[in-house]
Amino acid sequence: QVHLADSGGGLVQAGGSLRLSCAVSGRTSSTYPMGWFRQAPGKEREFVAAISRNGITTLYADSMKGRFTISRDNAKNTVYLQMNSLKPEDTAVYYCAAGGENTRDVRMRRLDYWGQGTQVTVSS
């Protein structure tokens, strides 16, 4: 069984930065493409970013391009989401996820595992 533990959320002012981490246990992280999703209150969960098994290919939602960067360190079994220039509308619970065969599968939610979520709150 694979377990994903996401962390790094918190309260930050608009324009600030946060780095989220997702630690993978139970199987090496390089087994899966991985990604991040988020869900704001009263809204559906939405795709944020995805990364291939070897970290070479990445995919972003249009509204996050240029501000968010997904990366992974397979030696540490960890995936990261660096978030810069944060806006109040980025406030949400952020979830990491794993599964599928490629980054398109991640975006299409063809996923096997989810983290428990970490809260990000951006104040204006």
Image: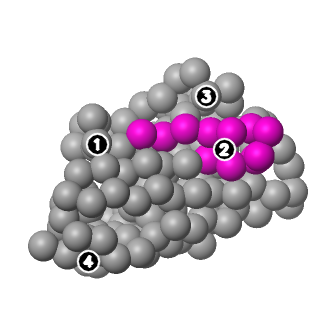
Element marked by disc 4: loop
Label 2 is placed on what type of residue? Answer: Gly
In front: 73, or 56?
Answer: 73
CA separation in Å, label 2 and label 4: 26 Å
Residue 94 position by quadrant:
bottom left
Query: In the rendered structure, which disc, 1 or 3, sits on the residue that comes first in sequence?
Result: 3
State the count of labels. 4
Residue 58 lies, in percent from the top left, at 48, 29
Query: In the rendered structure, which disc, 4 or 3, sits on the residue that comes first in sequence?
Result: 4
Query: In the rendered structure, which disc, 2 or 4, sits on the residue that comes first in sequence?
Result: 4
Query: In the rendered structure, which disc, 2 or 3, sits on the residue that comes first in sequence?
Result: 3
Residue beneath label 2, please?
99
Label 4 is placed on what type of residue? Answer: Gly
Residue 39 lies, in percent from the top left, at 36, 67
Query: In the rendered structure, which disc, 1 or 4, sits on the residue that comes first in sequence?
Result: 4
Q: Does 68 lie within the magenta span?
A: no
**Which residue is at 42% across, 40% downward?**
69
Query: Within 10 angstroms of label 3, few (less than 14), some, or many (20 or more) residues?
Result: some
Residue beneath label 4, please?
42
Between label 2 and label 3, give the one nearer the viewer: 3
- Region in magenta: 69-79
Between label 1 and label 2, give the one nearer the viewer: 1
Residue 73 lies, in percent from the top left, at 68, 39
CA separation in Å, label 1 and label 3: 18 Å
